[in-house]
Amino acid sequence: MKGESNTSIHVTKLIRLIRLSVVLLFAFIGSMIFFVFSLSINSSPQPIETAVSTEVLDDADWDKIENGIHVRTGLIDSEGLMAVVSNCTNCHSAKLLTQNRMSADQWNETIKWMQETQNLWDLGGNQEIIVKYLTTNYPYKKKGRRAILSNIEWYELED
Amino acid sequence: MERRKFIKQAALSSFATLIGTDIVFGSKLLDGYVPLAMQDPDPFALFSKDKGMVVLNDKPWNIEATADLLDDKVTPNSSMFIRNNGKVPEELDASTWTLTIDGESVSTKKTYTLADLKSKFQHHTYQLVIECGGNGRKEFDPPAKGNQWGVGAIHCASWTGVRLSDVLKDAGIKDDAVYIGFHAVDVHLSGDPEKEPISRGCPMSKALQDETILAFKMNGKNIPKIHGYPLRLVAGGWPASVSGKWINRISIRNKVHDGTKMNGKAYRVPCKPVAPGDKVKDEDMCIIESMPVKSLITYPKSGALLKKGKTLKIRGHAWAGELEVAKMEYSIDFGSTWNACTLEKPVNRLAWQHFTSEIEFPKTGYYEVWARATDTNGVAQPMILPGWNPKGYLNNACHRIALKVT
């Protein structure tokens, strides 16, 4: 009897312990799931993206186009503009693009060189868009062996 | 400040959106980068440059003079071109600055403070021509990649410092020394601390010349930050890229220096002449050493309207890399006839030489004055573009100005 009652108490205690463990386990798993989930939300670029694009919209001047020119970079507003702005004007000035009148081959070679030596990232499908934009809007101009003098500003010479 | 932070976020997240991945060095890439619209809009004030200077590139800063801005015998800071391969260092402290001489061919690796250099070695002052290897690149056809320099990536300032040879000898040069290579504190455009924006050099024979100096003064004052404060290597007559800015280390090498922009196609031209537009393999490209003979008409500015019967006084400078200019001429009939100019001797070796002339015009009309220098080897400037090369270096074609006699 004594033994039985002892046993039943032990069993009851054991059952309580198991129940508690299960509850704790679920609570733990639940909190872990919540934690991991919230962490993944925090690390996802989504909320930042939203916050930033709201600010971009607030900032009217940021990507303003005036008379067909992207004001911030001076680039011509045409198909592929933003791919060029986003990939090409962070490390160097857009002036380096507009002063170079190269062929598609030369641009592709230059991109390869920048990837090998200047830490330029893989441009993926944007590469074709960028090269097309550059060769269309800033085409090669024939100069020959010596160009004629142009854009001369005439002035009276006093001495 | 808030704005700057926001821009950084915006750019980074837009990258992530565009390419679907994080950018290696992305955070470094944008560190300190202020988008163009936010940058100091006035580089002329920032670097004390003349308003007439031409900005070719604002990241990195590349600014050149026009011919008329180079009229002074000794080029003032306000007219000196700016060429950077990387970002200009932010913090430059002369009081803690050191220069280390190391490399395979140094007897003892040695470090000098700036004060050591100034007190230990004799000071020398020279007027030295520094011309960008790509000066005149914009005229090449097919076009060559890079900053499209016109005529103004050249200056001849007065530099004061100690001879590189004195410092190298103090550290000790081993018999197998071949080349020196400089290292500086400027930062790669990508922000990657493992990369040097530029680390070039020259053979020992050039390094040991009297006029090759480690300069701490320019035109009698501390070197402006943008031109290499507090210590610059100055190797006159060679591509300006040999004259490294913000120098903190020079390696004596037992082979041709292999630093950034010593290899590939940088500052190299085809070893053998090629047709315009030809593809040239890297191994067929040779390092540029002395710059070629060249000259500039610095007065008057192109576009002068002159009254008939008046004499036109022209002036300018001529230089010839390692050599001297022996003869200076001008033509007003597109090279059919040439007339001698008065040419001065250089103040010191590797300084540019000044020329003047007086021109009478036979009748009213449109003229061009062409200038042509000939070096001591009898080599003259070509009237048309010299040999095409993939990177558009060494354009020493005759300079010309337009004018009308009315």
Image: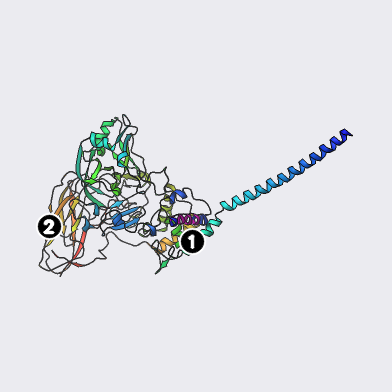
Give percent across and percent down for residue B161: 23, 40
Q: Which part of the image, by quadrant, shows the C terminus of chain A? A: bottom left
Residue B45 included in the magenta stretch of the image: no
Q: Are marks 2 and 1 on the same chain?
A: no
Residue at the outermost right position: A1
Judged by depth in the image, the label closer to the viewer, 2 or 1, is 1
Residue at the outermost front position: A2
Residue A124 in view, yes or no: no
**For residue B17, side relative to residue A101 (left or right):** right
Q: Quadrant of residue B313?
A: bottom left
**Residue at x 27% of width, y 48% of height:** B224
Residue linked to disc 2: B357
Residue kind at label 2, given as amino acid type: Ser
**For residue B12, side relative to residue B93 (left or right):** right
A148 in relation to B92, above or below: below
Residue B7 included in the magenta stretch of the image: yes
Residue B272 marker: none
Could you tell me which chain the residue with mark 1 belongs to?
A
- Dot 1 surroundings within 10 Å: few (below 14), some, or many (20 or more)? some
Give percent across and percent down for residue B200: 33, 42
B106 in relation to A39, above or below: above
Q: Which part of the image, by quadrant, shows the N terminus of chain A? A: top right
Question: CA–CA distance between discs 2 and 1?
Answer: 63 Å
Give percent across and percent down for residue B75: 21, 51
Residue A55 marker: 1
Q: Quadrant of residue B303?
A: bottom left
Magenta stretch? B4-14
Q: CB under 8 Å between callouts 2 and 1?
A: no
